Image (cartoon, rainbow, N blue to C red):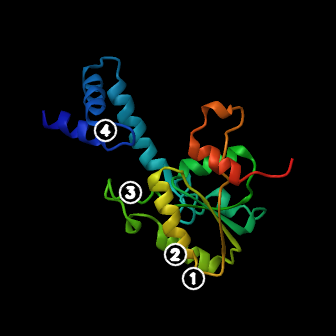
Amino acid sequence: MDALHRLTRCLSRLPGVGRRSAERMALKLVRDRTGLLQELADALRAAGETIRCCSLCGSIAPAGEDPCRLCADTSRNDRVLCVVEDPGDIALIEASGGYRGRYHALMGKISPVRGDGPADLRVRALLKRVRQGGFEEVVLALSTDGAGEATAGFLVELLKTENVKTTRLALGLPSGSAIMYADPLTLARAMQGRYSA
């Protein structure tokens, strides 16, 4: 049973997976007779051997590709640095096609509830890049939940001592949404961020 408990503990450490969900997943994996457990083990091993995070920006890249293709791309804007929470955020912003600068993934956000502080993030690496990189603007593309706001506030204060403009993503109504579905804070931010039509 130690192996089952260990598997459950490991699964529960994944984002969005609670203890009960981890238990159900672990039981499903050990009961499954289609080979899912072995297939998952092989996939995890292969990912561990072939995928890495770029040492510069933190983006997901093939092992042996460091810096990643985004960091190596000489056509990107070297004056703007977009700070995100996780490597997955880089992929989402890239898919939008609306940004051509550099990236920096923090690998999380400040969350006292989870015990994550600034020392757990790639803040030192961010400061080093800002000081050495010649950036004119740092865009904070962080979530708007409590932890994301706390992280953004911390970074804004930290970057005040650097010679760089710090900006945040615009906030407001999502495309295709109706006002009746927006919460008061979203409406207030949309009103503050209005633009000429």
From the image, tell me which residue sits under label 4: 11
- Judge left or right: residue 170 versus residue 28: right
Classify 130 as above or below 103: below
Secondary structure under tag 1 reads loop
Secondary structure under tag 3 reads loop
Residue pictured at 31% horizontal, 38% vertical: 11
Callout 3, which amino acid? Ser
Secondary structure under tag 4 reads helix
From the image, tell me which residue sits under label 3: 111
Q: Quadrant of residue 1?
A: top left
Callout 1, which amino acid? Thr
Classify 46 as above or below 30: below
Q: In 3D space, how far apart are the residues under numbered discs 2 and 3 (Cα atoms)?
A: 17 Å
From the image, tell me which residue sits under label 2: 158
From the image, tell me which residue sits under label 1: 161
Crowding at dot 3, Cα within 10 Å, few <14 / some 14-19 / many 20+, comes out as: some
Q: Residue furthest top?
A: 33
Crowding at dot 2, Cα within 10 Å, few <14 / some 14-19 / many 20+, comes out as: few
**91 or 171, nearer to the observer:** 171
Mark 2 or 4: in front is 2
